[in-house]
């Protein structure tokens, strides 16, 4: 056990903004928009919303409940409520966090680089060439290391002075920027076709397991679930918070930001006549198509582009700190390390782990699939089973700080039956796909 007393959030708003900061990130803008484009627009958005409410929300409340109840990082918290057999699940959580951060930071490095491009040189006319030139290689590795250094700095400053303060300042800024950009996009001639693409649902598209798999894994990734990030943040809460309503606020804000990001990306793309480009490439929606558009917009494009990538950097940073915090909190609780030592050792190790992803796109893709589609889904499945079937009195623990909640029965039933069933189907479809991506690396 560490000899330092456990840290606490300074305020309810601080906790909420930090949790929303964890949830809102590259997932809401980069991943959400390319998956929506790939899976036929609105049909995917509807399914994603359903997954957020039916499967994501119950798991988020489960993480909050376990984290606050135990007041410990994932491994110790699971052992606290379930005994030593659950220790491996906690260790899987920490490993997933490290793995996700290792490549997440590479993409975050691109956003830093593009933000700087907007300031210094503007976006060049050959957007695809630019992306190919900077996405992977020694330059990308350097930006990845730079972004990790920033993350290490914030987490090293502590829960209240580092994570909470950063989130309180940056999250409202991110939201204002996105709303401003959405209004700007709305004023562009030709944007109407973008709304049509984004908001008109063809329900036949929904009925495919492949889309279901993408919608579920996107919900978990975007809500930061399945690896103990929300659990760890909740472990710094007092017993007076109302967890069910906090989880609704966090999940709702996360969906709202993704939705608004779509209101920026799709109208802009259609206004610029770039829709074909988006459908052709996965990462393209953000890192090729939009800079292409910004370049055509001239001086205004540099301003708009700067704000756009600034929002992405903010989202990425507040998410990355939650990923690192899981590993750091575990090292503090399990090994008795000081925060500074834990942050340095874990941060440097994860930065090194990310180097292969920064040099080779196939590695990044495979690590993304392995952690996002398999580890997170398996982690969330196991956590739902744990809370639904094994944890003693989860309703009692979750209701501390509330005035009695009538839908707890529904919550427990979702955790017991619906969440495991949906996630088992998702795993069934995700494992072969991930296996192919991994096997391709070793050929
Ligand atoms: N939710 C973040 C995003 O949308 C990424 C993230 C942060 C995350 N912490 C996580 C994903 C924990 C999975 C698990 O960009």
Image: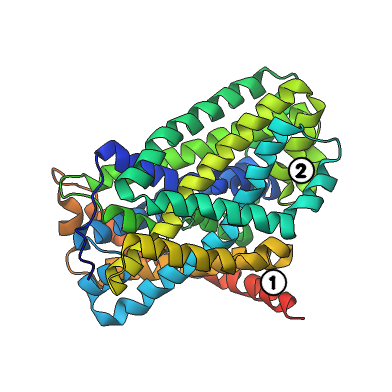
Left or right? Give the position of 117 relative to 44: right
Where residue 148 is drawn, which disc sits there? none
Q: Are marks 2 and 1 in contact (CB under 8 Å)?
A: no
Q: Earlier in the sequence, mark 2 or mark 1?
A: 2
Front-lying residue, 345 or 36: 345
**CA neighbours of label 1 inside 10 A, class few (<14), some (14 to 19), many (20+):** some
On screen, residue 63 above or below 197: below
Percent x, y of residue 112:
63, 43
Residue 280 in the image, given as x and y percentages of width and height:
80, 49
Is label 2's Cβ within 8 Å of ligand 1? Answer: no
Which residue corresponds to mark 2? 288
134 vs 153, left or right, is right
How is the rendered protein coloured?
Answer: rainbow
Q: Residue at x 62, y 33 (%)?
A: 308
Which residue is pictured at 57% across the width and 60% down the height?
213
Horizontal and vertical percent for residue 361? Answer: 72, 62
Q: Residue at x 58, y 67 (%)?
A: 352
Label 2 crowd bin: few (<14), some (14–19), many (20+), radius 10 Å: many
Residue 199 visible? The answer is no
Residue drawn at (54%, 66%) of the image: 371
- Residue 294 location (% of width, % of height): 75, 30
Vertical side of 232 occupied by 317: above or below: above
In terms of image quadrants, where is residue 292? top right
Instruction: State the quadrant of the C terminus.
Output: bottom right
For the residue pair 400 and 412, the one nearer the viewer reads as: 400
Q: Nearer the viewer, mark 2 or mark 1?
A: 2
- Residue designated by label 1: 437
Q: Rounded to the nearest whole Å, what is the CA distance between mark 2 and mark 1?
A: 23 Å
Quarter of the image with the N terminus in it: bottom left
Q: Secondary structure at mark 2?
A: helix
Task: Say whether residue 136 is left or right of residue 28.
Answer: right
Question: Is disc 1 placed on a helix, strand or loop?
Answer: helix
């Amino acid at each position: 056990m560490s000899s330092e007393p456990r840290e606490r959030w300074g305020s309810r708003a601080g906790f909420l903004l930090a949790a929303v900061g964890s949830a809102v990130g590259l997932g809401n803008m980069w991943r959400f928009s390319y998956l929506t484009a790939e899976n036929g627009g609105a049909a995917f958005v509807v399914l994603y919303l359903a997954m957020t409410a039916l499967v994501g929300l119950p798991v988020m409340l489960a993480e909050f409940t376990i984290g606050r109840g135990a007041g410990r990082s994932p491994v110790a918290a699971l052992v606290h409520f379930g005994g030593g057999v659950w220790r491996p699940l906690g260790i899987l959580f920490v490993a997933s966090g490290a793995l996700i951060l290792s490549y997440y930071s590479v993409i975050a490095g691109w956003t830093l680089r593009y933000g700087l491009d907007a300031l210094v040189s503007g976006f060049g006319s050959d957007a695809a060439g630019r992306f190919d030139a900077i996405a992977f290689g020694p330059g990308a590795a350097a930006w990845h290391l730079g972004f990790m250094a920033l993350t290490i700095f914030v987490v090293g400053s502590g829960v209240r002075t580092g994570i909470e303060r950063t989130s309180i300042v940056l999250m409202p800024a991110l939201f204002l920027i996105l709303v401003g950009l959405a209004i700007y996009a709305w004023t562009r001639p030709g944007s109407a076709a973008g709304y049509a693409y984004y908001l008109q649902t063809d329900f036949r598209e929904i009925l495919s397991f492949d889309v279901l798999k993408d919608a579920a894994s996107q919900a978990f990734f975007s809500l930061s679930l399945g690896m103990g990030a929300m659990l760890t943040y909740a472990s710094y809460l007092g017993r007076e918070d109302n967890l069910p309503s906090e989880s609704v606020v966090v999940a709702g804000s996360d969906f709202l930001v993704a939705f608004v990001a779509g209101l920026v990306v799709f109208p802009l793309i259609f206004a610029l006549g770039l829709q074909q480009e988006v459908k052709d490439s996965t990462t393209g929606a953000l890192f090729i198509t939009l800079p292409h558009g910004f370049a055509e917009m001239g001086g205004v494009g540099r301003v708009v582009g700067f704000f756009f990538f600034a929002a992405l950097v903010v989202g990425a940073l507040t998410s990355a700190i939650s990923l690192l915090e899981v590993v750091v909190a575990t090292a503090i609780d399990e090994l008795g390390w000081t925060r500074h030592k834990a942050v340095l050792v874990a941060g440097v190790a994860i930065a090194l782990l990310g180097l292969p992803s920064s040099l080779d796109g196939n590695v990044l893709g495979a690590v993304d699939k392995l952690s996002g589609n398999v580890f997170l889904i398996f982690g969330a499945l196991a956590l739902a089973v744990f809370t639904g079937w094994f944890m003693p009195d989860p309703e009692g623990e979750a209701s501390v700080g509330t005035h009695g909640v009538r839908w707890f029965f529904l919550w427990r039933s979702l955790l017991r039956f619906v969440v495991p069933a949906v996630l088992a189907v998702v795993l069934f479809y995700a494992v072969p796909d991930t296996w192919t991506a991994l096997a391709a690396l070793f050929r």
